[in-house]
Amino acid sequence: MDPEEFRRAGYAVVDWIADYWTTLGQRPVTSQDPPGAVVAALPAGPTERGEPVEAVLADLDSVIAPRLTHWQHPGFFGYFPANTSGPSVLGDLVSAGLGVQGMLWATGPACTELETVTLDWLAGLLDLPERFRSTGRGGGVIQDSASSATLVATLAALHRASRGRWRVDGIDRRYRAYTSTQGHSSIEKAARIAGLGADGVRAVEVDPRTQAMRPEALRTAIEADRAAGVTPVIVVATIGTTSTTAVDPLPEIGAICAEYGVWLHVDAAYAGAAAVCPELRWSHAGLERADSYCFDPHKWLLTGFDCDAFWVADRGELIEALTVMPEFLRNAATESGAVLDYRDWQVPLGRRFRALKLWFVLRWYGVEGLRAHIRTGVALADRFAERIEADDRFELAAAHPFSLVCFRLRAGDEPSAELLRRVNDTGRVHLTHTRVEGRYTLRLAVGSPLTTEKHVDEAWDLLSAAAEDLLTG
């Protein structure tokens, strides 16, 4: 494909994406076909001769798009949002076109420096503590996801707790990580990969009213482990838990971590984006005691997957834990100590130019545009929650400080589960579920930039009508 062929094909692909976004609201949110439908519709192998882009786009229309779960759909209210936007897509396109491998400053000076600047911009936008800025001992880097950020934080914490011995000796004693019972599953996975094992994670009980970690229970767990000869390594606190968006009490947790010398990592994967709005920064109170922090712009900040923003208060600890320097990577810039090599801030060696899409988004929307997006999501969630509270058939299952509403039928678990099935089967909306204090609970998460009051009201109308049929039929 020469540049002119690329130009023509590129116009066609951009037109296809624009048409897709335009027609999203007319499509079922989820595929109506059984497993194996795509496999059955595709040939057994590639064509002998190349095909024009029109043929590929035709198959996108007929084979792929009808069998997707449409995460950008205005009626997609499942899980947490995984937003993208025009600027993000264009930034990704430029990144793909440049084909830069940014493992070292020397392999992509602008790739590295733009990432440093963009993460500092983002830290300022969220009003993160100064200790996370690259102008001091800290700094930010883009990981693929909050799961990777948790793993990297765990490895750095292990390095600190073992005084560097684990790099040579491996796991030479029993170590423990701590999170609440509502902490993300990636914390257990990180502990397994790091060699702590599943038993290396202690789940700390939560306040049943708030679903947030109980600091006194954390202290008790740490003291019991220390008495048993187990070394506390890391506490993962959460701002916006997956089930209910509970916010762990960082001031108290941070004080305990400081007292016992335990690394504090704060996972704000979803709710961190809310801090672009000054009125929602209450959720970050106490963050100044964290050793590391992350959130996902690819969830609620209009930046396509994958893009996790991860900061550390002391980049030296992270680099010392993860650096490996084979001869073929040695270069004058690295040896000078004047540059950052982001390969030392992550598990893989290679890395894409992810900062471009985030930079495009920040420049296109600006501070006020991003704040407007977050505030719209919160307002729409409030609108839906008001419908729930005004209807005696339903009840809220948890507080809704951001753009997730957890609710259920008062009639119990089985009716609530059946309600979810009926509403999702319409193809007009898609919700997911969790359990709160053991009870089946529906989740409606607002986030798509295409979602308006009309779509939230439609979700409520579908739920209300299905509940009426279910409870009176």
Image (spheres, rainbow, N blue to C red):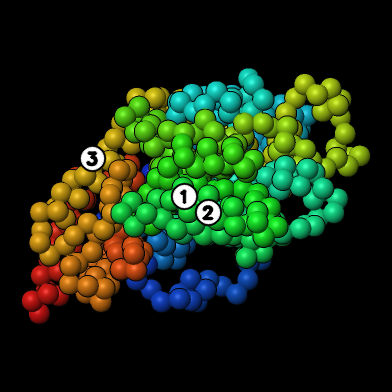
Q: Which mark is residue 216?
A: 1
In-front residue for pair 152/45 = 152
Residue at 52%, 38% in the rendered image: 254
Helix, strand or loop at disc 2?
helix
Q: Secondary structure at mark 1?
A: helix
Residue at position x 12%, y 75% in the image: 471
Query: Closer to the camera, 408 or 337?
Result: 408
Farthest residue, direction left: 472
Comes first in the chain, label 2 or label 3: 2
Q: Total number of numbered labels?
A: 3
Q: Position of residue 285 (x, y in %)?
A: 42, 33
- Estimate the x, y position of residue 377 in percent, counting from the top left: 29, 41
Q: Which residue is mark 3?
A: 379
- Please name the amino acid that badge 3 sits on: Ala
Inspect the image, locate mark 2, and give the three-letter code of the amino acid beneath it: Thr
Foreground disc of the pair 2, 3: 2
* Relative image position of residue 58 (x, y in whole percent): 45, 59
Helix, strand or loop for disc 3: helix
Circle 3: is it few (<14), some (14-19), or many (20+) Cα within 10 Å?
Answer: some
- Return the residue nearer the eye: 256 or 50: 256
Could you tell me if residue 55 is visible in this image? no
Foreground residue among 61 and 404: 404
Asked which quadrant contains residue 211, the reply is bottom left
Residue type pointed to by label 1:
Glu
Decide which of tag 1 and tag 3 comes sooner along the chain: 1
Q: Are marks 1 and 3 in contact (CB under 8 Å)?
A: no
Q: Are marks 1 and 2 in contact (CB under 8 Å)?
A: yes
Q: Is residue 260 left or right of residue 159?
A: left
Which residue is disc 2 drawn over? 220
Per the model, the C-alpha gap separating discs 1 and 2 is 6 Å
Q: Position of residue 19 (x, y in %)?
A: 36, 47
Tell me the number on the disc at residue 142: none
